Amino acid sequence: MFHLTLSQQAAVTVPIGSDLSLRRSAFKAPNLNFREKSWAPVLTLDLKANSSLRSRNVVCMSVQQASVPKVSVSPLELEDAKEPPLNLHKPKEPYTATIVSVERLVGPKAPGETCHIVIDHGGNVPYWEGQSYGVIPPGENPKKPGAPHNVRLYSIASTRYGDFFDGKTASLCVRRAVYYDPETGKEDPSKNGVCSNFLCDSKPGDKIKITGPSGKIMLLPEDDPNATHIMIATGTGVAPFRGYLRRMFMESVPTYKFGGLAWLFLGVANSDSLLYDEEFSKYLTDYPDNFRYDRALSREQKNKNGGKMYVQDKIEEYSDEIFKLLDNGAHIYFCGLKGMMPGIQDTLKRVAEQRGESWEEKLSQLKKNKQWHVEVY
């Protein structure tokens, strides 16, 4: 069983056209430091210095994109379906998958623990970016003795090809739900989240019952590869956006060549709580014209009024730009705990009114145009 740290995973660059055996072997090597050497030559071209090149009409992809080799994926038949797969495995007949790896994502100063969990479904539970899996933890339902636990839904944090680019795994981003007694301040394991603790405690080779995939609201619209996508996440709500961004910037998908703008706002408590930060930072370096990334660290940053910096404060900071993008057809997505939405809605309403617009009318129009996507839990 192979085990890979996220930092290695994020920095791997595999040459275009590489076959599956090369990709598999790349991930098996335990002691390689992928950060020190680039596997593929990086093209650098100074257009300012070379006026003869600049004056010619050269038709090619941008130099920025040419310098970043993408990872080949398979099987490409996963692109053929016209409709997303839905509820292939129902709660009464879940699919038994296998845990590949469990990785702690956060640093020592993060409040709580968040894990990245890779699950091998053998290609039997295909999904699209933005969908969710249901997980049925082992044991019986305390409210219905003899019956299994209820299904818990988790947004999938990988593309349809999975973290190994072969269409056989899915990844989940799970925060361990721990209950502390308000009087004693001590953890009460009897009230801890059953499913999140099962997932975070699982080991490679463990079996896991999954249902789904489910959900259509967060599917990535791909009809316009040059569209703008504004993604707003708190904590593990970043899961579907990791999938979108890998599809846009990491994978070589013949039918989807992203040339638009992806703008991610991520709200967490502090720097140690950032999720997939290396991966996102790499896109920022590789695709500066197509990706923007703004972090709101509530315990480390202050908003303009001197209070804690929440994701809605970041939205307000860039509100003029965001509203203009929405007016021009941008998609906006929200994912995370449902407590995030009132503050965000209040901010957007206030900004709209300052601009002399009615937020209710604007929101109604965004929903009608299918630009507004919300999945909160």
Image: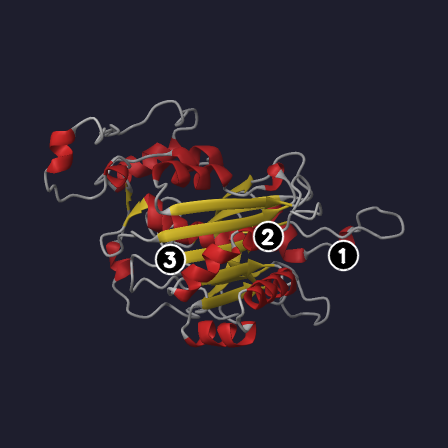
Horizontal side of residue 9 vs 141, given as left or right? left
> Disc 1 vs disc 3: Cβ atoms closer than 8 Å?
no
Residue 220 locus on image (x, y percent): 38, 61
User: Which residue bears the numbered disc 3?
Assistant: 228
Residue type at mark 2? Val
Q: Nearer the viewer, residue 346 or 324?
A: 324
Residue type at mark 1? Lys
- Give the spatial CA distance, label 2 vs label 1: 29 Å
Closer to the chain start, of discs 1 and 3, is 1
Quadrant hosting residue 44: top left
In this view of the protein, can residue 170 be seen by the observer? no
In this view of the protein, can residue 314 be seen by the observer? yes
> Disc 2 vs disc 1: Cβ atoms closer than 8 Å?
no
Closer to the chain start, of discs 2 and 3, is 3
User: Which residue bears the numbered disc 2?
Assistant: 311
11 relative to 217, above or below: above
What SS does tag 3 mark? strand
Query: Extreme right residue here?
Result: 183
Give me the residue at 44% from left, 32% from top.
Answer: 8
Closer to the chain start, of discs 2 and 1, is 1
User: Which residue bears the numbered disc 1?
Assistant: 191
- Give the spatial CA distance, label 1 vs label 3: 42 Å
Residue type at mark 3? Thr
- Give the spatial CA distance, label 2 vs label 3: 19 Å
47 relative to 295, above or below: above
Residue 225 locus on image (x, y percent): 29, 58
Residue 190 locus on image (x, y percent): 77, 55
